[in-house]
Image (cartoon, grey):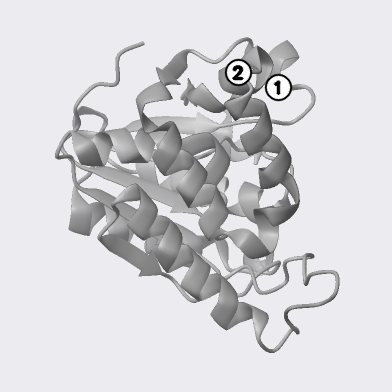
């Protein structure tokens, strides 16, 4: 489907590189269209598992490495408004729920987005992903319905297709593959192990790799009355 021009796009993810594979082509497209994009990254991913072989980082140095990688990724996409929100990796699930909702509410009030991109609660696997998704949905739910921004959610749990069906928003980002590859390469501490093979497949015209890379898939969040009970 054609990517619609938005007033402002707010992207909320918990870790550096959460945006890279599934969203960076869409972000790059919005920016090329002249749409302002704000990326709120909740942590620095300082508990990331990849420290290199041989190690290129320690637990003490990884936060600064990932901070610099995040800045480089934003530069690759064209993002000028990056917010590093200062939460600690792998502890987002333990943050106070109301604090998390208020964090997102403040971002919404400031940026007045017409579209928010985040994870889909219940279908995003990692506890930090789930906590982020819940906070975003609860914050958007509090916006009067007439003023409520659209919410595109990334879902990849094993049961997603069975329970949610197929994604209803599919962006063809073929024109942004170079930017997407640069974004992924910017997160080298976490992606270097996969990128050499992936770039070779793309260069060889591997249809499966191209389809996977060039189509970014989202679910329009389905508002339902039992949300608070579900989560």
Residue 226 left/right relative to 104:
right
Per the image, label 1 sits on a secondary structure element best described as helix
Disc 2 to disc 1: CB gap under 8 Å: no
- Which residue does the numbered mark 1 point to in the structure image? 160
Q: Quadrant of the N terminus?
A: top left
Drawn side of residue 177 relative to residue 211, left or right: left
User: Where does residue 54 sit, x and y in percent of width and height?
Assistant: 85, 74
Identify the residue at image location x=58%, y=77%: 65
Mark 2 or mark 1: whose residue is earlier in sequence: 1
* Residue 120 x %, y %: 57, 35
Residue pictured at 44% horizontal, 17% vertical: 169
Tell me, for residue 47, which label it has, or none. none
Q: Nearer the viewer, residue 75 or 18?
A: 75
Residue projecting furthest to the bottom? 60
Q: Can residue 216 be seen by looking at this rendering?
A: no
In this rendering, does residue 199 appear at all?
Answer: yes
- The residue carrying pointer 2 sits among few (fewer than 14), some (14 to 19) or many (20 or more) residues within 10 Å by Cα, namely few
SS of the residue at dot 2? loop
Q: Which residue is mark 2?
A: 205
């Amino acid at each position: 489907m054609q990517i619609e021009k938005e007033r402002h796009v707010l992207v909320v993810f918990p870790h550096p590189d959460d945006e890279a594979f599934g969203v960076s082509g869409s972000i790059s497209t919005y920016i090329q269209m002249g749409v302002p994009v704000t990326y709120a990254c909740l942590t620095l991913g300082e508990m990331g598992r990849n420290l290199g072989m041989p190690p290129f980082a320690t637990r003490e140095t990884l936060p600064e490495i990932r901070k610099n990688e995040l800045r480089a990724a934003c530069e690759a996409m064209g993002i000028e408004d990056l917010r590093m929100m200062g939460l600690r990796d792998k502890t987002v699930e333990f943050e106070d729920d109301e604090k998390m909702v208020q964090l997102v509410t403040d971002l919404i009030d400031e940026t007045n987005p017409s579209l928010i991109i985040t994870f889909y609660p219940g279908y995003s696997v990692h506890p930090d992903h789930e906590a982020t998704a819940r906070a975003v949905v609860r914050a958007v739910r509090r916006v009067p319905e007439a003023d409520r921004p659209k919410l595109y959610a990334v879902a990849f749990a094993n049961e997603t297709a069975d329970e949610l069906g197929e994604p209803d928003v599919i962006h063809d980002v073929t024109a942004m593959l170079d930017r997407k590859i640069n974004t992924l390469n910017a997160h080298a501490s976490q992606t270097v192990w996969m990128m050499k093979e992936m770039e070779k497949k793309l260069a060889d015209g591997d249809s499966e790799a191209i389809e996977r890379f060039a189509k970014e898939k989202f679910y329009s969040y389905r508002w339902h009355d039992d949300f608070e009970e579900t989560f």
